[in-house]
Image: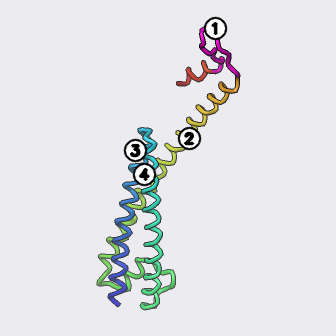
Amino acid sequence: MTAQIAELEKILNQQLVEHRSLLAGIDEHLGSLRTLRFDAVQAAATSIEQSRTRVVMLEVKRRMVMQQLSRLYKLPADASLQQVAEALPQHRGTLMKLRDQLKQVTADITRKTTVSSRVAGAMLGHLNTVVRLVAGAMQQASVYTRQGVPTVAGRIGVMEAVG
C-alpha cells in the first residue's frame, strides 16, 4: 500500500524536476532566439526535446501507478490525483503540494512556449522575406564592367532599403 504512494510521490517529484528543466530549456531557447544565436537555439531545442521525452516517460509511469491506486482504493479508473489524495488523508498534503507545484510549472511552460513560438514565427517570416528578395535579385543576370566590377540589378536597392 505505501509502496505505491511512495512510488507516486517519487514520480511526481521527478516530473517536477523534469518540468523545471524543460522550463529552463525554453528560457534558453527564447533568449537565443532574441539574440539570434542559432547554435544556442539548436542546443536549446535538443535539450527541450530530451526533457519532453523524459516527461512523457514519467507520465506513463504515473498513469500506471494511478491505475494501481485506483484499483486498490476502489476509485474510478480515471481517478484524479485529488481523488487519490482524498482517499489517503495522511498523504493528502504532500500530494496536493506536488500537484500545485506541477500546475504552476506547466502554466509557466505554456506561457513561455506561446511567446517563443511567436518570436520564432516572426523570425521565420523575416528570413523568408530576405530569401525572396535575394532570390529575386539573383534571377537577373549580371554583367561585368571593364574594370571587372559586376553591375548590380535594380532590385538590390530594395533589399538595401530593407536592411
Which one is earlier in the sequence, the residue at label 3 or at label 1? 3
Q: Amino acid at mark 1?
A: Arg
Dot label at residue 28: none
**What element does badge 1 sit on?**
loop
Residue interval drawn in magenta: 141-155
Which one is earlier in the sequence, the residue at label 1 or at label 2? 2
Question: Circle 1 sits on which residue?
Answer: 146
**Residue at position x 66%, y 18% from top?**
153
- Is the Cβ of the residue at disc 3 closer than 8 Å to that at disc 2? no
* Label 2 CA crowd tier, 10 Å (few <14, some 14–19, many 20+): few
* Label 4 CA crowd tier, 10 Å (few <14, some 14–19, many 20+): many
Question: Circle 4 sits on which residue?
Answer: 44
Which one is earlier in the sequence, the residue at label 4 or at label 3? 3
Question: Circle 2 sits on which residue?
Answer: 124
Colour mode?
Answer: rainbow
- Is the Cβ of the residue at disc 4 closer than 8 Å to that at disc 3? no
Left or right: residue 125 versus residue 100 is: right
As displayed, is residue 8 above or below residue 20?
below
Residue furthest top as drawn: 146
